[in-house]
């Protein structure tokens, strides 16, 4: 019962994002839950360590190193500023902005793409007298949709790919068509919602407001792009993905000009800690056989968690209660390793569901936080107006794809 209580309180805290009277965020709450599991005796220390899927953690860590190389090389800033010159043509600019966000998110962590692009685009749009809301919301929406297409697009896909032992090529082939259809619908929805409202209702940005962004360095950016190309090529081989990613990251750290501490400083330790803590919390309920009891209870009600529609619905709901990373970590326990389509379905549904409301994905929260620092408020209702329609369309596409 102690483990079940810790699990319930931890997931409730992660869903709410805070604990009253304490300055704990979602990662702090998850870490506190993991500590309670170990200190309370629900999970022995050696099992707590063994429960962490280190190949997934190492893959995520290595990809953050690659993303950091591109960020410090000024690649993200250069791309954002180049496409920002098209903001005088709102629909074209929106399409290019969303397409760039989707493609880069499919190859690198979508959180990093949003973190790097948001401030540059925000100030460029304000300076041009444009309404930043459709473009920043489009950035977040496209990053989520694009990241769904590959195993390395987002943290939950990395976990699914590792635990499900999925082929990079097979995953790409199955997930890309619905991601493309979802992207097309998302673009059309944003254009329709913001028709006639492309002009800014906010004061124009001032140059002296802008933060310092890394200057574009062709050599360092080129190294990062070559690393990404090599990484994708290696993912099509039989070499374990975490080994390939770590090897490429190690090569990037061997630089005569860029200090390794600057690259490592950009690693998202917050997200890595969240992952490790949730592995331990879920191990606590596994040891008391709660997942098996839940599956048995649902089976008794005639509900099959592995049914495509049921899995899609549960994944969507849970992703918007506790965010898609914790939801995925819980649901993978119920999947059949011999049926890869279940794992593809969970990857797509949990990622598409991230667009529904602000807490659905970390990428949403990053865009909202970064936009707020630039003086742009994206509230819950503003995001949900787009998110509800985009998610409904994306899930309809996914359901159709299942049966096609």
Image (cartoon, grey):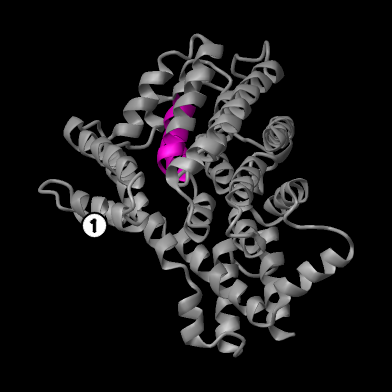
> Which residue reaches farthest left?
256
Residue found 59% across the figure and 66% down from its top: 23
- 248 with respect to 33 (left or right): left
How far across and down, in percent of the image, does residue 206 sit?
43, 25
- 299 with respect to 96 (left or right): right
Q: Magenta residues: mostly which secondary structure?
A: helix
How far across and down, in percent of the image, does residue 194 sit?
67, 18
Q: Nearer the viewer, residue 116 or 205?
A: 116
Q: Quadrant of the C terminus?
A: top right
Q: Secondary structure at mark 1?
A: helix
> Which residue reaches farthest bottom?
41
Query: Circle 1 sits on which residue?
Result: 261
Badge 1, how many Cα within 10 Å: few under 14, some, many 20+? few
Residue 111 in magenta stretch: yes
Q: What span is colored magenta in the figure?
A: 104-123
Residue 300: which quarter of the image?
A: bottom right
Q: Tag count in the figure?
A: 1
Residue 227: which quarter of the image?
A: top left
- 62 with respect to 386 (left or right): left
Residue 142: which quarter of the image?
A: top right
Tell me: residue 299, above or below residue 108.
below
Residue found 53% across the figure and 88% down from its top: 44
């Amino acid at each position: 019962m102690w483990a079940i209580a810790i699990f319930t309180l931890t997931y409730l805290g992660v869903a709410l994002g805070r604990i009253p009277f304490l300055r704990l965020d979602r990662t702090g709450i998850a870490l506190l839950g993991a500590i309670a599991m170990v200190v309370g005796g629900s999970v022995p220390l050696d099992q707590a360590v063994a429960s962490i899927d280190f190949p997934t953690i190492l893959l995520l860590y290595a990809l953050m190193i690659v993303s950091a190389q591109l960020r410090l090389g000024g690649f993200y800033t250069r791309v954002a500023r180049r496409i920002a010159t098209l903001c005088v043509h709102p629909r074209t600019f929106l399409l290019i902005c969303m397409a760039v966000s989707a493609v880069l998110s499919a190859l690198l962590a979508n959180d990093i793409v949003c973190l790097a692009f948001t401030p540059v685009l925000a100030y460029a749009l304000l300076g041009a007298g444009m309404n930043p809301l459709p473009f920043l919301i489009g950035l977040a929406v496209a990053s989520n949709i694009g990241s769904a297409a590959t195993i390395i697009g987002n943290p939950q896909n990395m976990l699914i790919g590792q635990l499900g032992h999925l082929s990079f090529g097979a995953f790409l082939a199955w997930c890309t068509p619905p991601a493309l259809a979802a992207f097309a619908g998302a673009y059309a929805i944003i254009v329709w919602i913001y028709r006639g409202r492309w002009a800014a209702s906010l004061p124009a940005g001032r140059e002296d407001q802008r933060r310092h962004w890394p200057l574009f360095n062709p050599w360092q950016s080129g190294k990062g792009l070559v690393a990404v190309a090599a990484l994708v090529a290696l993912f099509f081989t039989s070499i374990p993905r975490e080994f390939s990613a770590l090897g490429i990251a190690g090569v990037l750290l061997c630089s005569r000009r860029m200090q390794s501490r600057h690259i490592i400083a950009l690693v998202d330790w917050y997200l890595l800690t969240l992952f490790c803590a949730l592995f331990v919390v879920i191990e606590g309920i596994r040891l008391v056989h709660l997942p098996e009891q839940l599956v048995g209870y649902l089976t008794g009600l005639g509900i099959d968690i592995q049914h495509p529609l049921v899995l899609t619905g549960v994944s969507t709901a849970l992703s918007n209660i506790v965010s898609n990373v914790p939801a995925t970590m819980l649901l993978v326990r119920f999947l059949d390793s011999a049926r890869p389509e279940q794992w593809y379905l969970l990857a797509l549904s949990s990622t598409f569901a991230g667009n529904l409301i602000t807490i659905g994905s970390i990428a949403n929260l990053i865009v909202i936080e970064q936009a707020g620092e630039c003086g742009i408020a994206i509230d819950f209702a503003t995001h949900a107006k787009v998110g509800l329609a985009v998610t409904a369309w994306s899930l309809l596409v996914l359901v159709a794809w299942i049966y096609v």
